Image (spheres, rainbow, N blue to C red):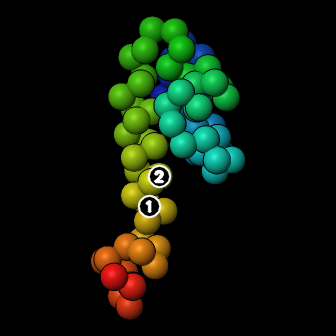
């Protein structure tokens, strides 16, 4: 799905950028240009980043919802 119409950036491209370590909207924007023109995709970028952070958290030993996590 296209996230940024102005720059033609898809959610897959954003995913690849996040996988490379870019964790903020500003960092993603710097890497691919998404969110740098009209700004209408910034909310979608935030949502994608939040989703990536949430999906990375399960299994984290410091996450209290992980069975056997240290508290």
Apparent side of residue 66 relative to residue 10 in the rendered image (left or right): left
Is 52 situated above or below 4?
A: below
Residue at (58% x, 38% y) in the render = 14
Q: Which residue lies furthest to the bottom in this view?
A: 68
Q: Quadrant of residue 45?
A: top left
Which residue was labeled with disc 1? 55
Query: Can the viewer see residue 8 in this picture?
Result: no
| Identity of the residue furthest to the top in this view | 38
Q: Residue furthest front?
A: 71
Decide if residue 53 is in sight here: yes
Task: Determine crowd level at label 2: few under 14, some 14-19, many 20+ residues with C-alpha closer than 10 A.
Answer: some
Looking at this rendering, what residue extends furthest in the left direction?
Answer: 65
| Residue 58 found in image quarter | bottom left
Where does the image place residue 57, in percent across and percent down from the top left?
43, 65
- Residue located beneath label 2 in the image: 52
At x 33%, y 82%, the residue is 71
Q: Is mark 1 on a helix, strand or loop?
A: helix
Is the residue under label 2 in contact with that under label 1 (CB below 8 Å)? yes
Look at 38% across and 91% down and name the residue there.
Answer: 68
Label 1 to label 2: alpha-carbon separation: 5 Å
């Amino acid at each position: 799905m296209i996230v940024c119409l102005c720059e033609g950036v898809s959610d897959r491209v954003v995913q690849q950028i996040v996988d490379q370590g870019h964790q903020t909207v500003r960092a993603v924007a710097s890497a691919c240009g998404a969110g740098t023109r009209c700004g209408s995709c910034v909310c979608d970028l935030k949502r994608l980043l939040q989703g990536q952070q949430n999906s990375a958290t399960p299994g984290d030993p410091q996450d209290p919802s992980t069975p056997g996590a240290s508290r």
